[in-house]
Amino acid sequence: MNATDSILPPASTALGTYGRTGAIAGPGDKVSGAQMATIDKTAKEYEAGFVSAMLESMFAGIKTNKMFGGGSAEEMYRSLLNQEYGKAVAARGTLGIADAIKREMLHLQEAH
């Protein structure tokens, strides 16, 4: 397997017929553009939250320099900064978590 190969199929192969009544699409229906946009948004929000939580745990052991910062305000702003880092990583799509989640969401719609 070389660097260009992927274990998961490309996101474009996930577009097809999915779901049943009460799901994203009815039997035999294709997922509409608006529905795909909702799925994409949800997957990116999940990836952003995951990255944010990962960064929170990474920075948890780092002590602040009392001379130049610290306190409850820095803790709050660090949390907000980690959330923004998570959103930026998810928007770039470099980790591919959102793509995997999107494919799984579509797969689950197909199974029901």
Image (cartoon, rainbow, N blue to C red):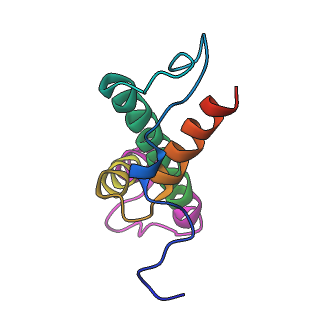
Give above or below for 40 relative to 69.
Answer: above
Give above or below for 111 relative to 48.
Answer: above
Q: Is 72 left or right of 53, judged from the image as shown?
A: left
Q: Which residues are magenta?
A: 57-82
Who's the residue at 44% across and 59% down the image? 10
**98 and 112: which is toward the camera:** 112
Whether residue 98 appears in magenta in the rendering, the answer is no
Q: Is 109 left or right of 33, judged from the image as shown?
A: right
Who's the residue at 43% across and 27% down the image? 30
- Quarter of the rendering occupied by the C terminus: top right
Whether residue 77 appears in magenta in the rendering, the answer is yes
Q: Position of residue 106 (x, y in %)?
A: 55, 37
Instruction: Name the outermost residue toward the top.
Output: 22
Who's the residue at 39% across and 24% down the image? 35
**53 and 64: which is toward the camera:** 53
Instruction: Name the outermost residue toward the front.
Output: 28
- Quarter of the rendering occupied by the N terminus: bottom right
**25 and 42: which is toward the camera:** 25
Who's the residue at 57% across and 70% down the image? 7
Q: Position of residue 52 (x, y in %)?
A: 48, 51
Give residue 67's quadrant in the image. Answer: bottom left
